[in-house]
Every structure is written in C-alpha cells, then in structure tokens.
Image (cartoon, grey):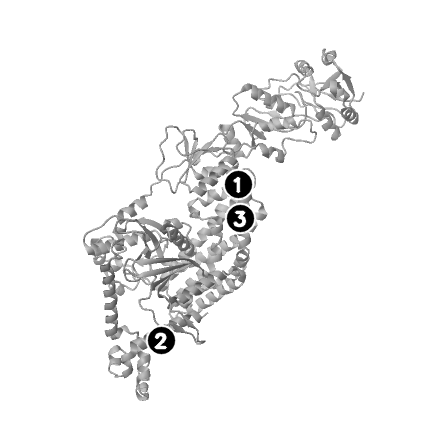
Amino acid sequence: MADSSMLTLGTARSLLADSSVCDSRIVEVTNDHTFLAAACEDGEEMLPKVETRVVLVGEAGRNRVLLKALQDINTPFLVTENVREFADGDSAEFETVFVLMDFNSSDYSFLHRQDSRIVGPPVVLHCAAKEEPLLFSCRPLYCTAMLNLSLCLTGFRNKDEMKNLVNLVHHMGGTIRKDFSTKVTHLVANSTHGEKYRLAVCMGTPILTPLWIQKAWERRDDVHFHAGQEEFRSEFKVPPFQDCVLSFLGFSEEEKTNMEERTLKHGGRYLEVGDERCTHLVVEENSVKELPTSSKKLYVVKQEWFWGSIQMDARAGESMYLYEKNDSPAMKKAVSLLSLTTPNSNRKRRRLRDTLAQLSKETEISPFPPPRKRPSAEHSLSIGSLLDISNTPDTCKGMTESSTPVLSKQSARWQVSKELYQTESNYVDILSTILQLFKDPLEKEGQVGGAILAQEEVKTIFGNIPDIYEVHTRIKNDLQELLSDWSENGSVGNIFLKYSKELVKAYPPFVNFFEMSKETIVRCEKQKPRFHAFLKINQAKPECGRQTLVELLIRPVQRLPSVALLLNDIKKHTSDDNPDKITLEKAIDSLKEVMTHINEDKRKTEGQKQIFDVVYEVDGCPANLLSSHRSLVHKVETVALGDQPCDRGEQVTLFLFNDCLEIARKRHKVINTFKSPLGQTRPPPPLKHISLMPLSQIRRVLDLQDTEECVNAFALVVRPPTEQENLLFSFQLVGEETVKSVWLRTLCRHVANTICRADAEDLIQMTDPDSLQVSTKDMDSTLSKASRAIKKTSKKVTRAFSFTKTPKRAIQRAFMASTTPDKRGQRLSCENRVCSSSTLAAHHSPSMVHLPSMFEKKYHTFSRSTTHLF
C-alpha cells in the first residue's frame, strides 16, 4: 500500500450554523502524500499521521474510469457492496474514505450518521486529472463545482429550503457564511430587500438566485465544470426589478412603452397608475405637477432610480431617489411680475420694459460690468436708459439725483466681445459636462457590475474632447482677463491667434470622425442595456439640459463657425485705426484654416440648396446668409402682432437656420420680373427682407397662453448689441401645419446651441399675453384691414413728399449725374464733405423729379444681384 496518509478534524457541526470557522478549506496533500493541518483555534497540537484507505461502494466499484483514476494517483482501494462491514469506524491505522455514486441512498445516510468521510466520483476524477492526491473535507464532498467559493444567503423564510441549499453547496465544495463580509464571493438572494443585498450591491458582489445552486448540482458529474464561470453564472443574476410592480407617470407614450418593456426584461411587472398592487411609482419629475392619491404606501421615485437600477444590474436604494415636488421661487417671482398691470399707459410701457428686463435677466451670465464713460458723459444719460435697472420712477429719480456713478451706454464692440465670452464660457461648461458626466465614469475602474463599455469604444466616442476642452479653457480665461480690464484698444484677435496651432491639432480629428462616434453610440445603446441606462440617467440631469450625448458631442462641430461669425461681428464694430482690426482679420483667417482641414464630405449639400432657395425667395436677402456651415432648420408663416420688427398685421415668414433667424414680410407690391443677362426671366420674389438676426440675440422665448383675445401666439425677447433695452417681437402662427410647442422647442434648441447652453427648456416661459399687451383680436376684421391699408398709404405719401427719406448716397449720385462739369468740379472742392439736403435742393435738376423711381430700380437690381456673390 502506498504511503497515503490523511488527518481527520473531528465531527461536523450543524449545517445551519456559520460554517466560516468549522469549514476546513479543502486542502490538497503535498507531493509526498502528507497533509499538515493548521493548528486549531484552541492551540491543540497537530494529530499524528494515518494511512488513507479508499472504499468504493456499490456502483462505484464497477466504474472502470474511476478504478483507473485511483491507480493513476497511486491510491489503494477496496470494493464493497455492504458498507456496514465498516460500521466500527476508522481504526488507529487507517483513515477510510468512502466513494459513493448516489448521495441520496441508504448507504449515504448510514455513513453520514457514522460521521464517515464521503466523496463522490468527480472528486477522484478531478484529483486524477491534476495528478494530485485526494482532497480533504470534513463534510461529504461529491464534486468540486464550488471549490473556493464562499456564499451568503439572504431573504429565505423556509428553513427546509435553506437547509437543502446549504447541503448542496457543501457537497460541491463551497462554504457558507452567516454574515456578509468581504470574504463572501457570492450572495444568494431570494429577494431584493435587506442589508445584505444593499452591501452586496455597494461592494459589487454577484447576486444570484437559488436556481444557480440547483442548476450547478445538476451538472455535478461534469469534472470540468465550475459554478463560478461567468458564462454560467450570468444566467442566474437576480434581476433588478424582482418582486417589484412599477407604474409610470408623466412620460410620453413612446418612452413609457420603452420603460415597460425594460421592466419585464429585468424581472419586474408593470400596472397602470393607481393600481393598489404597485410597489413603485416612477415619476418624470420635470412634467409631473400633481401626484395621484393612494391609500397604500409605495415608493414614489424619480426616473433616475429606474435607469440606475438597470445600469448597476441591481435594485438601487429608493431613499436616494425619492420624488419631491419642486416649487421654484424664481419662477413664482417672474410669474407675479408678468401678472401686474396698471391702467396708466405710461406705466404699462414702463412695466413692459421691466418685465422684459426680468425675463432676460436670467440669461445674463456675464460677470463683467459695462465700461464707464468719462464723468462729463454720465450726465447726458436719460431716465429711459435706466428702466431695465430700476422698477419705479422714484428709484430712477433717486439714482439721477444722487452722486452715484451711472452705467454708460455699452459700446457695440464691448457688447459683442462680452457675447463671445459668454458663449465661450457656456461651451467650456458643456465640454466639462461631457467629460465629467460621461467620459470619466465610463473609464473609471471598479464599476459596479463591471465595465459598461470597452476602452476602445470609449476612445472612439469621445476622441479629442479632452484636448478641445483644454485649449478652450485657456481661451476663456484670456477673454475673461481682457473683459475684466476692458479697453477699446484691447486685442481680441490676438487671443485666437495665440491658440491657432492647438486648434488645428485638436479639431480636425474629432470633426472628421464624428459620424463614427455617433454610430458607435447608437450601436452600443442598442446592444448594451447598461449603457442605455447610463445615458438615460445622465441625460436627464440638469447639466445636460435634456440633450442626448450625440447632441452634446455635435457642439465642437458647430463651434468654430460660430466663433468666426462673432469675430467678424467684432471686426465690424472696430474702427479702422484700431490695431485689433488687422489682428481680427488674421484670427478669422486662422479659423478658416482650421475649418479647411475638415473633410468636405461633412458639408450639408442639401442644406446649402435650401439656403439658395431662401435667397431667391427673399428680396434684399443679405449675401452673408450663404455660408458653408449654415443649414435651414424650419420655416413658419406668421402674422406680426406688434410694431416690431414690422407693422401689426403684416404677413411675416420666419426662416430658422442653425445659428440665425431670417425675418421677411410679404411684399406689398410685386415689382416687374427680373431678367438676367442670359435672357432668362425669373419670377419676382414674394418676400421682402426685414432682418437677419443671430440667434444669440434672443434672450427669451415666450409661449403666450391662449385666451379669448390671444390665440396661437408667441413672442421673442430680443437684445441687439446696439440697443440698450430689450425689444419684443410678437407673432401669431398661421395655418395648422405648424404645432406651436414643437416650433418653440426647436427654436430654443438652436438658440441654446448657438450660445452654448445646455438648458434649452429654460429659455421657454409660459406668459400671460395681457402682461405684454399682445392680442390677436380683430386681426381679420374689415376695420382692422382698412386701418392697416390707410397706415401703409400714409407712409407712402409721407415718403413721396419727404425729400430726406431718400438715402443720402442715392441723392449724391443723382446730383453728380445731373450737374455740369464746372459744377462737378465745384462739388469735388468741398473736400469730400457730405452735402446737406438744403444744399442739394438749391441746385435745380430735371432728373430730381424722377429720383425715387430711379433709386428703387437701382436698389432692386443690387439686392437681387447679391444671390450671385457666392
């Protein structure tokens, strides 16, 4: 007999007790077939060596594979059909190990009562495959399917069920711990409640169902199987919504259907709101105003709890996501201001200016005060220029009479420079949001439930965003320093020239591969539920402004063209003798150089075609509307309700582009068709250009409530850089094809994109039309139409008899054409001074009678020719 000796460590303890102490880890004997056990807790000496004797019982003795395995590991064995022959137990010379095929037989029960050492055939085959001696265990050990696994059980109320599971774990070589600790490798949970479950979620311990143990036992004869294999274990994870019955409130039908499908997929059930069987009410916190009453106590949680549970692949704690009704004091104050009206017309106008100032105040984020003029210029300010600062005439009077310095009129150059800083600051905040909310968590090690995305996918999605964020942070800081100590001679262009090389390195790689980034996001969101839940959680946060990750990542694609436009606007308001004029031109050229590195296939050819259509449709449309980065988003037909940007009752068409708004009115009288040099006749343009307004000038979008006197109307609070007060543009939508809510959301989304703000929804505010003195009443009445016709006729008559209404340059050209050479020389001797109207009137010319018609013809030809500039 070979020298195979083992130790016995006494009788086994109760199966239901904490086995972390009494369970001897299954120990392998050394190469010399000896095992030295560790000293017991009470410090007793190690037991003497004894020889191991293997006894094959019943069917095990007729298993040829088993017999050969024992021979391979040089272990002697006996074969018996009657285990009672060994009823006397072990002698002092032998440690007897019984090999049984069935742990439910009467032989097993007899040997177990005798505290005999019992193993199954898979244990022998396992040791033979590794060419190792038999493993030692103080409990019956059938296989090694749970070798080195330490389990903790929770949520079981049936003791017999729990006892059966504990026995199976021990038979497969695992251990059971009563208390949850870091030594526990798996938690077997019968419910998603309790402290052990919460600890396992926090520590990232796998949480499995009891079926995991049962299915592992079914594969007990597979020598190569182990229950800890990820492929096998993943089938038995406890779903996050197990034992949960959910209902959803405040979501769109599409979103609700999506969440209901995911509830079923992750082990839960769903019912309609108000059902007494519901355990959770998931609320869309931004749309729900009132909660339904319920007699049953249930969890009212935000949608973040729902998506967080899916992301972690475990039920999140409800206490962190409980819904609380949020009443905004700032909104209450704004609403109260809008509801105030007075019968006095002067006070109404003043109140309107105050209201507009209040509405636009929340959008002012600049920390810089406007520059001051010299003291002598401060006294020339009118009371009206202070109306958007004070609220009452008394306050204005006090400020005028006091010696406190008064803010001067802001220069257009300073105003646009401040706007550049504001958009740059907002853009840096958005980049920071992308990095902090999305990129950093996806790259973090030790994520609960494992990595959400592979590192290659993270790199593909975010690309050069960190480099772009770094260079724009430095640009923002330099702009802040420049505006803090503002001077009209300060150089804005030098800031962008300074970082032109960094911009060339950072932008093209990201923009050129943006489509690949977008495709990766879409693919991962469909294939990986945890990534979908991750996006849902973060996109619902205020920092994202309800924008998707794709919508946030498109900002770098749009940023450089927006900066170039702002720099060009600053250049327009920069005097020719200012050194920054040349520097700004160089800065704009450097940005164009960056954009030339971007692939031409990124251009939106269809959008360009639509812009040309607008140019041909609108007479006098500015040539700078044509731009490679610009695209048409929406077109709406409206009627003007105020005095700006055109008269009340005018039919106005709004063309929304991604960065500007073209406002055009229907022509009063269509001029003759335009005939091109090639002889082709083009139909006359139906619209007349009024204004091309950058979206950055829109401070607030007002959704006017429908009343008896105001229907389907909205208004824009506008602040051009050359104006000291806010302007109100009010319109009424015409036709049923345009839904007001959709149009306003689209408009706000692109305004937010232009000024680099994430909170697009905050730009919309529901407003009482009476507070703004806006009404759609009698717009289509005969009297109203007659009044507008009289007003138009009056303007035409006034223009016809008013010599000063004709532009000075046209008058000068007509005067030059009608004078004699002597008179023309006399005109040149004026040292290029502009002649006054009275001087021109002193020179009689027959052509002066036809001046208006001549000017209209020339002006029209110029405006139509702008369509051929590009």
First in residue order: circle 1 vs circle 2: 1
- Residue 498 location, x and y as percent? 48, 62
Q: How many labels does the image show?
A: 3
**Farthest residue, direction bottom:** 822
Camera-side residue: 615 or 463?
615
State whether residue 185 appears in this view: yes
Q: Do the residues labelled 3 and 2 touch (CB within 8 Å)?
A: no
Helix, strand or loop at disc 2?
A: helix
Q: Which amino acid does label 3 sit on?
A: Ile
* Quarter of the view holding residue 723: bottom left
Does residue 757 lie above or below 816 as drawn?
above
Q: Quadrant of the N terminus?
A: top right
For label 1, the crowd category at 10 Å Cα-Cα, with few meaning under 14, some 14 to 19 and many 20 or more, is many
Which labelled disc corresponds to residue 530?
1
For label 3, the crowd category at 10 Å Cα-Cα, with few meaning under 14, some 14 to 19 and many 20 or more, is many
Camera-side residue: 153 or 769?
769
First in residue order: circle 3 vs circle 1: 3
Residue at x 47%, y 50% (from the top left corner)? 432
Q: How far apart are marks 3 and 1 (CA)?
A: 13 Å
- Residue 234 location, x and y as percent? 59, 34
- Which residue is disc 3 drawn over? 521
Residue at x 41%, y 62% (from the top left corner)? 566
- Of labels 3 and 2, the one closer to you: 2
Q: Is residue 12 left or right of residue 800?
A: right
**Farthest residue, direction left:** 344
Q: How far apart are marks 3 and 2 (CA)?
A: 54 Å
- Which residue is disc 2 drawn over? 858
Q: Distance between the residues labelled 1 and 2?
A: 65 Å
Camera-side residue: 635 or 361?
635
Q: Which amino acid does label 1 sit on?
A: Arg
